[in-house]
Amino acid sequence: MSVEATLTIQHQTQIAPNIYELCLAGSIAEQPVTPGQFVDIKIPSDALLLRRPFGVAKVDTQQKTMTLLYRVVGEGTTILSQAPVGTELSVLGPLGSGYPIAQLQSGQKALIIGGGTGIPPLYELSRQLVAKGVQVQHLFGFATQSAIFYQSEFEALGPTAYATNDGSYGYQGHIGLLLDAQFADALTTYDAIYACGPKGLLMAVDNRFAEHPNAYISLEERMACGIGACYACVTKLRSNPEVQLKICDDGPVFKTNEVLI
Amino acid sequence: MSVEATLTIQHQTQIAPNIYELCLAGSIAEQPVTPGQFVDIKIPSDALLLRRPFGVAKVDTQQKTMTLLYRVVGEGTTILSQAPVGTELSVLGPLGSGYPIAQLQSGQKALIIGGGTGIPPLYELSRQLVAKGVQVQHLFGFATQSAIFYQSEFEALGPTAYATNDGSYGYQGHIGLLLDAQFADALTTYDAIYACGPKGLLMAVDNRFAEHPNAYISLEERMACGIGACYACVTKLRSNPEVQLKICDDGPVFKTNEVLI
Amino acid sequence: MVDLAVNLPGLQLKNPIMPASGCFGFGQEYSQHYDLNQLGAVIIKAATKEPRLGNATPRVAETPSGMLNAIGLQNPGIEAIMAEKLPWLAQHYPELPIIANVAGNTLDDYVSVCQAISTAPNVHAIELNISCPNVAHGGLEFGTDPQSAAQLTAACVAVSQVPVYVKLSPNVTDIRPIAQAVEQAGAAGFSLINTLVGMRIDIRTGEPILANQTGGLSGPAIKPVAVRIIRQVRSISALPIIGMGGVQNATDALELLAAGANAIGVGTANFTDPFACPKMIEQLPIEMTKYGFADLSRFAVTQEVK
Amino acid sequence: MVDLAVNLPGLQLKNPIMPASGCFGFGQEYSQHYDLNQLGAVIIKAATKEPRLGNATPRVAETPSGMLNAIGLQNPGIEAIMAEKLPWLAQHYPELPIIANVAGNTLDDYVSVCQAISTAPNVHAIELNISCPNVAHGGLEFGTDPQSAAQLTAACVAVSQVPVYVKLSPNVTDIRPIAQAVEQAGAAGFSLINTLVGMRIDIRTGEPILANQTGGLSGPAIKPVAVRIIRQVRSISALPIIGMGGVQNATDALELLAAGANAIGVGTANFTDPFACPKMIEQLPIEMTKYGFADLSRFAVTQEVK
Ligand SMILES: Cc1cc2nc3c(=O)[nH]c(=O)nc-3n(C[C@H](O)[C@H](O)[C@H](O)COP(=O)(O)OP(=O)(O)OC[C@H]3O[C@@H](n4cnc5c(N)ncnc54)[C@H](O)[C@@H]3O)c2cc1C
Ligand SMILES: Cc1cc2nc3c(=O)[nH]c(=O)nc-3n(C[C@H](O)[C@H](O)[C@H](O)COP(=O)(O)OP(=O)(O)OC[C@H]3O[C@@H](n4cnc5c(N)ncnc54)[C@H](O)[C@@H]3O)c2cc1C
Ligand SMILES: Cc1cc2nc3c(=O)[nH]c(=O)nc-3n(C[C@H](O)[C@H](O)[C@H](O)COP(=O)(O)O)c2cc1C
Ligand SMILES: Cc1cc2nc3c(=O)[nH]c(=O)nc-3n(C[C@H](O)[C@H](O)[C@H](O)COP(=O)(O)O)c2cc1C
Ligand code: FES
Ligand code: FES
């Protein structure tokens, strides 16, 4: 059940160039989320009507806090990044379907693939998997070394490999190339594959793991209602493009080979 | 010379139902104003484009602070009243012509007539007159006793008579009636007359003191530019209605009998 | 006690607030958030003869105090709406009046959808959408020419079991001849306004943000246009008007009522706040009391507008 | 170094930013605040044959991210403008290109003002205002009918010593035939857009806030309409476009340029911030660098818009 509630900014820190860690306290954080779910935030500006969707990077149900990680890209995130501690935000969530994890057992292996601002929800995913005893391998793509965030946080959960476009850290090149070079047998090695990131990354994962029985990608699209009522955020079923699914509601997580990216 | 500058909210207090005292600190307050001048404030909301005009109730050039008194009437003043201490406001001013006071000598007598939210700029006026040694008599109209603000402040400067619509304080009835009842010889008794308030009050004053050589009223009108460029705030010259004056720039203060109210 | 009831042809409403077409789906999603019985009525998403996939994505973009949409009338088609969507509403909210928004490519499309959908027991009125800016055919074409608008209206009125409200476009030089033609053709009322045509461009690419290039502008940005058009149509017609365009709160609703509307559609505001409608219904009596109105009858406006 | 220069018929501009007509008077007031030589040009307030008193007050009202105005073309008349306003500008800012906005009731009015004002040495172009929504005669009438628009344009072009840009109204069903007619009649370019027609109502009284009832809607609220119309006209014409409508900052200016404009008018933003224009001129190279543009030439758009 998604709810609309007022959450309060508990702290907010810039953790990389243009990347902010936002910690919100309030009732929505009393319940755990399915990793991959997102929240839809009303930006505190009268002129901005549409809520902004952000993946949930961490929920601490004891502290009743929720952490989001976001990049400043436009007007809404600029205003959000300037909101002081104590600001009250209207938050709608948790929304969407999230990544299935119930099928995994302790000791099984999961490959978590992310790029840029697709990475935040993968942190809650990795936390929940590790809590179940699943062994996680992270594989993250960034433009350049300085853009990397949450490195130690992820490394604390499992081995973490990086690819950077300019080669300034880890493998040089995009995630697809790193997959081919160092994780060529991932299709069979991992019990589950989870991905979130830019379109190119999702296509690379969708492509390589189309046949994997347990591989998931998370999509982004411009949204209005966030709850499936307005048909803003549709994507077509690959097996039958006459059927459209709503990313906000049926997604944002889909199985590989399920939808047309 | 009017300037645009950032002023900071130093404190803000509700001093009567819906009436706020707002103290702003910053460069504009380093210079004295002509009483009756106003400032034009950008409300901190992205959706509200037009600045709001407010008479200057007090300038303290030593402390570099400026005091405004305003009533919450709509969206802009509602947002302003909720702005916390420390908020930075873009302020344009001081604007307009203000009340002439140079002609008065120490010992001369001035009658200051105001109603409701027309009263704020009369405080700075009275302060400056008293500083010159002018004897001031205040005459203020309010809807009801609880609406009265700045009573002790004005009484400290000179005798202050009140009229309330419901008779809950002072004279019962509007200012015109009080003028007729208790200040029937004001035309000759006072060396100067100054008024600011609702249209009815201004008409009553304009009417009664049309012939007074030193009587002034301050007008209000909806404004856009605030500096005389857009022709939003015009009023017609009484002697020649083909000539229009701009309230923001030629006014807001006019001589009695000068313009069509 | 303030009385919010409104009686219009086909519509006995306990209050004048209804979600606008396309901004509330077929009610299911928002029913997670609150009891839809609070609403005066619900205007459901456009129904067309065949299922429609709509336009490519991105379908929405934000603008100052507004948004653009180019959904393209995606809907499951009249059959599925009759078989699933309307029955779901009838089952969960048997007392809730539904207004069916009808769209199509051709006159025949419109006629067949009106005929079918007006037989659904919970459909109390039709909102004839001749003003959708986001489809290649039909839609706006019927809405910009008085004669085509009248022809379509007459044909739909003839086959409909319920009153037909015609939803007009603000994207015209003069709305009055169109409103007049539609009234003469037998419309029971008007729905005003649909979206303005707008565009946003992504500076990085120089390309429109919306895949459809243009989209319909809605939200508070268009409220002054809605007020103007409602008052213009009110000045030449006594027919009921469902007013919409930028209503975010009870004060906005009162402004559209004061312009001449008899009921209020709420679109974009649902996205900003999913509880916008129930909050408005709660706030309306408080605001009305503040301004001294005991019921909605004083909002009977007939002034002429230049 | 980013190059902001723009060369248009009659206008060698050091940058594309110019205050829009009616929002900057004749320059004197804003010259208290900054050196007008920073501007690309100034479009002065509408000039009419006789002095105009304009409409009754209130003349402005606020709307979400916008405002309404119904000034009604108040101006001191062509004689005073030629005798005082233009000479003041020529004396204080001899290098500053002035664009004269011309309005009237009849074709003859327009013609005589164009003839006179185009002889002023600092008037480099005329902006023919056939789109003012706030006057009873002329204005909008010429702007909604292709034939009248063409006739007026041809007559004004014939008598003008400087290029004539025609300012079109967005309050039409289809702007393209009007733009085409105006181009064929000899216009040097377009000015897009004038205001949308809107209204605000005071709930307390049920009466419009503006004495004129309706007013012109400007500001960011209309930016998506401006972008759409600029792109529509760009898709059928290669003539230069002075784009305006809701430009508040350099990013907005780039969006209108990307839509197809060649220069940018700034209206309402001057009221929100008297320094809006110089700030934009300062910010433009920074924003352009961010997006990788070395000059304004890449903004040559010809895509078709549905
Ligand atoms: C399910 C989901 C989860 C997301 N999670 C994250 C996250 O954890 N961290 C993060 O940094 N970003 C995330 N994003 C992207 C984030 O929503 C956008 O970066 C943000 O909305 C931009 O807002 P803005 O006002 O700064 O940009 P503007 O460009 O000014 O926004 C204008 C409009 O476009 C929309 N928009 C712009 N970019 C996107 C986008 N990429 N996806 C969807 N809508 C967009 C905005 O929501 C707004 O409606 C997520 C997006 C989706 C759909
Ligand atoms: C020269 C001058 C001096 C003023 N001094 C004071 C003062 O000292 N104290 C005080 O309380 N009020 C004063 N006012 C009135 C004050 O400007 C308005 O009450 C205020 O603008 C209302 O803003 P709002 O957003 O709350 O109201 P809204 O009604 O939401 O405002 C909408 C628009 O209408 C304008 N508006 C509304 N009422 C008025 C009005 N009475 N006069 C001019 N514009 C108006 C607003 O500025 C805004 O542009 C003065 C007005 C003028 C012209
Ligand atoms: C996402 C979206 C979808 C819409 N779909 C429809 C539709 O299917 N049929 C219709 O007649 N109007 C449709 N509209 C227009 C609204 O019903 C309404 O007329 C318009 O948005 C103005 O109201 P608002 O400003 O409250 O949103 C849609 C609007 C939006 C924002
Ligand atoms: C107060 C005001 C007065 C205006 N006067 C004129 C005018 O005299 N002639 C004209 O062509 N346009 C006039 N306009 C329209 C503007 O020039 C401009 O086209 C419009 O406001 C859109 O730009 P903006 O959103 O930047 O304000 C006026 C606009 C405003 C707000
Ligand atoms: S955002 Fe409305 S359906 Fe997804
Ligand atoms: S407000 Fe623009 S001239 Fe007075």
Image (cartoon, coloured by chain):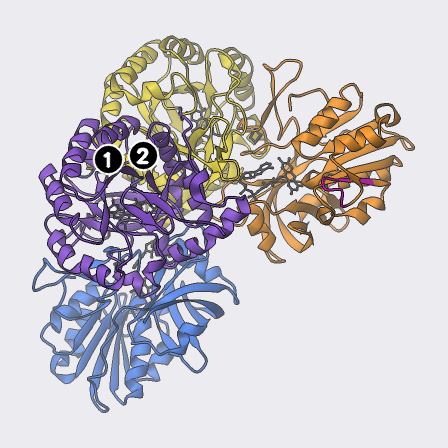
Chain colours: A blue, B orange, C purple, D yellow
Mark 2 element type: loop
**Magenta-colored span:** B161-168
Q: Which percent across, then down, holds residue D103? A: 41, 17
Please say if A97 is above or below B110: below
In terms of sequence position, does the residue under pointer 2 or pointer 1 come before the other? 1
Q: In terms of image quarters, where does ligand 2 lie? A: top right
Question: Where is the C terminus of chain A found, in terms of image quarters?
Answer: bottom left
Where does label 2 land, which residue? Answer: C239
Does label 2 point to a residue whose CB lies under 8 Å from ligand 3? no
Where does label 1 land, which residue? Answer: C187
- Residue B258, quarter of picture: top right
Of residues B89 and C182, the one drawn nearer to the viewer in this rendering: C182
The residue positioned 53% from the left and 50% from the top of the image is B44
Q: Amino acid at mark 1?
A: Ala
Q: Chain of mark 2?
A: C
Q: Chain of mark 1?
A: C
Q: Is residue C147 left or right of residue D246?
A: left
Q: Which percent across, then down, holds residue B169? A: 78, 45
Mark 1 element type: loop
Contact, mark 2 vs mark 1 (Cβ under 8 Å): yes
The residue positioned 36% from the left and 24% from the top of the image is D131
B162 is within the stretch colored magenta: yes
